[in-house]
Amino acid sequence: MKTVEDYIRTIPDFPEKGIMFRDITTVLGDADGFQLAIDEMTKLLEGLDFDVIAGTESRGFIFGTPLAYNLHKPFVLIRKKGKLPYDTVSQEYDLEYGTAEIEMHTDSVKPGQKVVLVDDLIATGGTMEAAAKLVEKLGGEVVKMIFLLELAGLEGRKKLSKYDVGCVVSYPGK
């Protein structure tokens, strides 16, 4: 029986020498691989009491929406600044060189709602930390963060240590 890791393509020396790039397009491009990925991410939520699933642009949308559909939960978009049409709340965060900003609609999470955050990858944890701050600004509670992949060598879990973090596949390096 195949595992999710069997569907992930590793590309050495991309985007630069010494990096092992973990390509998830091969998971998405195979019906069995994609279904297995969603099934495994769903298992990370078994027994968890929550109200809303929120995903970060753009691969968090890819994994978050089928999870929300399967679990009959609303799905909330967390987008890059300037992409949402209604009133928003925003959060800036640091990148390797500079900063970025994400936002969500002010009415997307209600005070007291329990929220699961979803993305494809946990690397340094900066984007997901900013997403959690957005949820908290709106009065929501982040009860879990789930990822398909983890690059453990980048120590994103340290930045997210106050949250319950789960992932399907963890790679030791960067």
Image: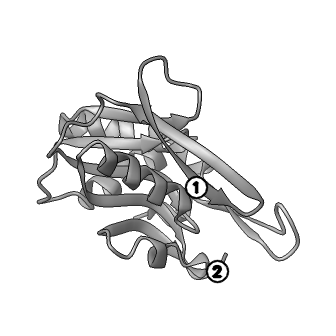
Q: Nearer the viewer, residue 150 or 124?
A: 124
**Residue 80 appears in the figure:** yes
Determine which of the numbered discs, if any, sits on residue 152 in the image: none
Work out whether residue 37 can be spotted.
no
> Which of the two labelled residues, at mark 1 and mark 2, occupies the earlier sequence position?
1
Query: What residue is drawn where x is 83% and y is 60%?
Result: 15
Q: Which of the 4 quarters of the picture holds residue 82? A: top right
Looking at the rendered structure, the secondary structure element under dot 2 is loop
Residue to which mark 1 is pinned: 93
Q: Tell me the element at label 1.
A: strand
Q: Quadrant of residue 124?
A: bottom right
Q: What residue type is disc 2 on? A: Gly
Residue 46 location, quadrant: bottom left
Residue bearing mark 2 = 173
Type of amino acid at the residue the image marks with label 1: Tyr
Residue 88 locus on image (x, y percent): 43, 29
Cα separation, mark 1 vs mark 2, equals 23 Å
Observer-side mark, 1 or 2, equals 1
Circles 1 and 2 in contact, beta carbons < 8 Å: no
**Observer-nearest residue: 71 or 86?**
86
What residue do we see at 58% from left, 67% from top? 123
What residue sits 58% from the left and 41% below the top? 29
Residue 90: x percent and y percent?
48, 40
